[in-house]
């Protein structure tokens, strides 16, 4: 069983897709051991509780210094002794110490085809606003391993999604979630948990 910690900040629909995948058996050998949110009001915490998963909040608001928050976050992760950390809509910068300690064991879902509309400042709805402003005809989602840059780690899987006439950022976000994010994040978890993913020189290989 791949002991997995899922980090969230908001609605938690990607977390839900993973919970459902485990329940339906499309994801095997994965156990979510803890869900961590930086935001006490995140509905994702509720989703975790409803699924019987331990849900904890580590909020930067409760610490005077950023470094104290980062230490508390680190502790919350390490107490759970995870094999893998999944950032599922986690909108906080991960402490570099954690990234070094969990090299190629942290994955993130990003709502565009990286490298488009990625990096600092591109998160959530802002990504879709930028895609529409640029007038791209195809966007999508990417699952990648997390390195010390922002959205720069090895790419694991991408799924394209067409932009349609009249799309608003909200409509496009919903399509990207339904057609790409909720599909590839569960798939990637299953592949990792079943030993099919290796990373060599920054390139991800998926075995048959
Ligand atoms: C998702 O669209 C995810 O791709 C995005 O936040 C949303 C979270 O939704 N993540 C980023 O933008 C990271 N840069 P959810 O809480 O319903 O899963």
Image: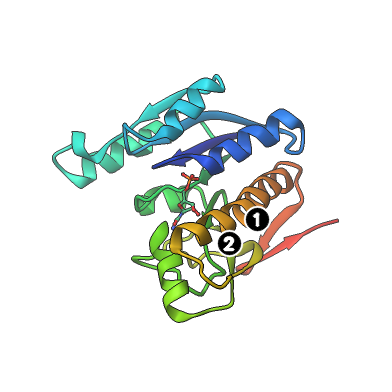
The 10 Å Cα crowd at callout 2, few under 14, some 14 to 19, many 20 or more, is many
- Which of 11/55 is in front? 11
Cα distance in 3D space between marks 2 and 1:
9 Å
Residue furthest to the right = 208
Q: Which disc, if any, is residue 95?
A: none
Q: Is residue 80 above or below residue 175?
A: above
Q: Position of residue 132 (x, y in %)?
A: 46, 73
The reply to whether the residue tagged 2 has its Cβ within 8 angstroms of ligand 1 is: yes
Q: Is residue 146 visible?
A: no
The reply to whether the residue tagged 1 has its Cβ within 8 angstroms of ligand 1 is: no
- Which of 112/190 is in front? 112
Numbered disc in front, either 2 or 1 = 1
Q: Position of residue 168 (x, y in %)?
A: 46, 64
Q: Is residue 59 above or below residue 134?
A: above
Asked which secondary structure carries label 1, the reply is helix
Q: Which disc, if any, is residue 141?
A: 2
Q: Which disc, if any, is residue 179?
A: 1
Judged left or right of residue 94, residue 152 is: right
Q: Quadrant of residue 163?
A: bottom right
* Residue drawn 39% across the image and 31% down it: 76
In which quadrant will I find the N terminus? top right
Point out the tag, 2 or 1, that comes first from the N-terminus. 2
* Residue drawn 42% across the image and 61% down it: 148
Callout 2–callout 1 Cβ contact below 8 Å: no
- Which of 67/139 is in front? 139
Q: Is residue 48 visible?
A: yes
Residue furthest to the front = 166
């Amino acid at each position: 069983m791949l002991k997995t910690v899922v980090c969230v900040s908001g609605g938690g629909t990607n977390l839900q897709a993973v919970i459902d995948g485990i329940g339906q058996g499309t994801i095997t050998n994965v156990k979510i051991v803890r869900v961590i949110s930086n935001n006490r009001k995140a509905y994702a915490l509720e989703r975790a509780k409803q699924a019987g998963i331990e849900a904890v909040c580590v909020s930067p608001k409760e610490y005077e210094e950023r470094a104290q928050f980062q230490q508390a976050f680190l502790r919350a992760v390490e107490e759970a002794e995870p094999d893998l950390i999944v950032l599922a809509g986690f909108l906080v910068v991960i402490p570099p110490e954690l990234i070094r300690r969990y090299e190629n064991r942290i994955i993130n879902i990003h709502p565009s085809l990286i490298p488009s509309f990625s990096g600092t400042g591109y998160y959530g709805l802002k990504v879709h606003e930028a895609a529409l402003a640029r007038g791209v005809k195809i966007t999508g989602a990417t699952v990648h391993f997390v390195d010390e840059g922002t959205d720069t780690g090895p790419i694991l899987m991408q799924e394209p999604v067409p932009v349609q006439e009249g799309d608003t950022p909200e409509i496009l976000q919903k399509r990207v979630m339904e057609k790409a994010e909720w599909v590839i994040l569960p798939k990637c978890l299953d592949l990792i948990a079943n030993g099919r993913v290796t990373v060599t020189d920054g390139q991800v290989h998926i075995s048959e």
